[in-house]
Image (cartoon, helix red, strand yellow):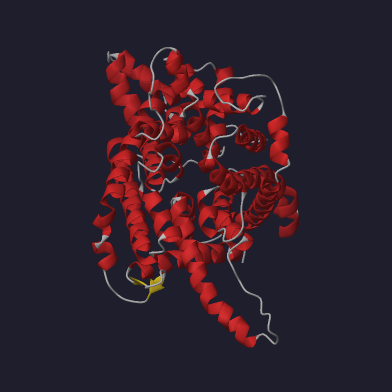
Amino acid sequence: MLLGPATAWLVVFLVLPFIAIAVFSVGERAPEGGYQAAFTFAQYANLPARATAFWNTMVLAPVGALACLLVAYPVAYYLALRAPQRWRLILLALVVIPFWTSLLMRTYAWMYVLGGRGIPALLAYIGFEDIRLINTPGAVLLGIVYGYLPLMILPIYVSLERLDRRLLEASADLGATPLSTFLGVTLKLSLPGVMTGFSLVMILLLGEYLIPTLLGGGKVFFIGNGLVDLFLQSRNWPFGSAIAITLVLVSVVVLIAANRISTRVSGARRVDLI
Amino acid sequence: MRAFVIAVFAFLYLPIALVVLFSFNAGHHASEFTGFSVQWYGKALANPFLVEALKNSLFIATTSALLAALCGTAAALGLARVGIRKRAVFDALLGAAIVVPGVVIGISTLVALVQLFGVVNPFLASIWPDDQPPRLALGYGSIVAAHGLFSMALVTMIVGTRLGSLDRNLVEASSDLYATPLTTFRSIVLPQIMPAVVAGFLLAFTFSFDDFIIAFFVAGAQTTLPIYVFASIRRGVTPEINAIATIVLVASVLLVVLAQWQLRQRKPSN
């Protein structure tokens, strides 16, 4: 009985909508837009029509997640193993706060910094005229790292914090160099956190809309942009549903792969964030 | 490594600091700070569309967070008593509610509700006695429901974690001393999980207040603050948006700090 309301909520607003788009994805577009009942895989066969958006997303999502990881790991490492005790909680809070602050506002901040009157104006001042920063793939990548960095730092921090420090000492006592201790012990045991962060960031990037829209200026087109267009403008719901279903399937594959890698290398499942 | 970490924190906070700084700029231009002024805050709060959007967002965030806190807490308590298989199914659904990208949640809710309304509205029209039958449409209800889905899953997980670390001895002692299950719940369980419930509520509120993409799909004719801001940003960057952004940032930061503080309250150290 306690589970009743939550179950109803999950069924009505998660399971049923998912079934609805699954049904739509094998349907046809009605002439005036919307949906017409059918059973066809034409929508899925048509996926290459959005190949550019798919390609951009499939490249920028893993690259973005990797860039996030490269920046996040040293920070998480410092927070978990090197930071002075009294600073640790404050620094951790400074990571958590952006995680829960509006992505729209934070992306807007970069629009502001990279836009015509931000860094380009400064560059023009010191003699570099006409440097374009916003509306480039580089700006989108920067926005991605900025937006998702906290989500990457947190799980890595959690797994590094749980790490048994005696293992590090043992490794050093047995004559391992700092580098081989790092590779053989630290990195290996923090892999569950790395995999959690990487898969979460990558899945969220697969559906990203705000960052490419605001920092890519319509030039860098993501699947998310395609979905907004198909559902809110051109009203081709069946095709949009097929793309959404594909996106969910790719996400599931990413999650399973992340779990597999993590279990195989370090013997532990990925880290739960909460 | 310390230098790198400092640089990363600067990277995280400098752009935000710039937005806040220029929200107090007396001039129109983003490139030069010409003096301190709060005029843009005044302009923002005198804008009726903006105030309307802000009110909508506050209403939606409060409602969805309250519902999520209630249903999520109930679910966490219920989950502690069900079999392992049922629990696994439920956990998978909660995980899905949290992990599925907002854009997919948005469109699937849109599709399902539009289909549902397509069936229900003609039916209501046919059974309604007079000429003005109620028409279901996208709006407050659909945003609250879609936001609440994520929030409820979040609250269930946060409260569930707290329940897991609850001292079972206290519960047993309470029932050994002939307390009714309700009394045990009120005087032992509830006080211990309350910080988690409050933290869950605050995070749920923050999520709903900040969300753009889900509301973008299911808002129908309604406007929330992020939707309004998004539309204005696309028309151009103005100090007025900086003022709104500053208000939203400050509000989010306060809520998150409060939530974290609640989560750390009387947490068993382990």
Which quadrant holds residue A102? top right
Instruction: Tell me what residue is drawn at x 48 percent, y 17 percent.
Output: B6
- Between B240 and A59, the residue placed more toward the observer is B240
Q: Is residue B165 left or right of residue A141?
A: right
Observer able to see residue B179: no
Residue B68 percent coordinates (x, y):
62, 55
Q: Examine the rendered structure and indicate whether residue A55 appears above or below residue A26.
A: above
Q: Is residue B42 left or right of residue A91?
A: right
Q: Is residue A161 left or right of residue B221?
A: left
* Quadrant, the N terminus of chain A: bottom right
Residue B118 percent coordinates (x, y):
52, 76
- Between B261 and A247, the residue placed more toward the observer is A247
Residue B109 percent coordinates (x, y):
49, 62
Observer able to see residue A211: yes
Q: How many marks?
A: 0
Which quadrant holds residue B243? top right
Q: Examine the rendered structure and indicate whether residue B156 appears above or below residue A156.
A: below
Residue B27 percent coordinates (x, y):
64, 25
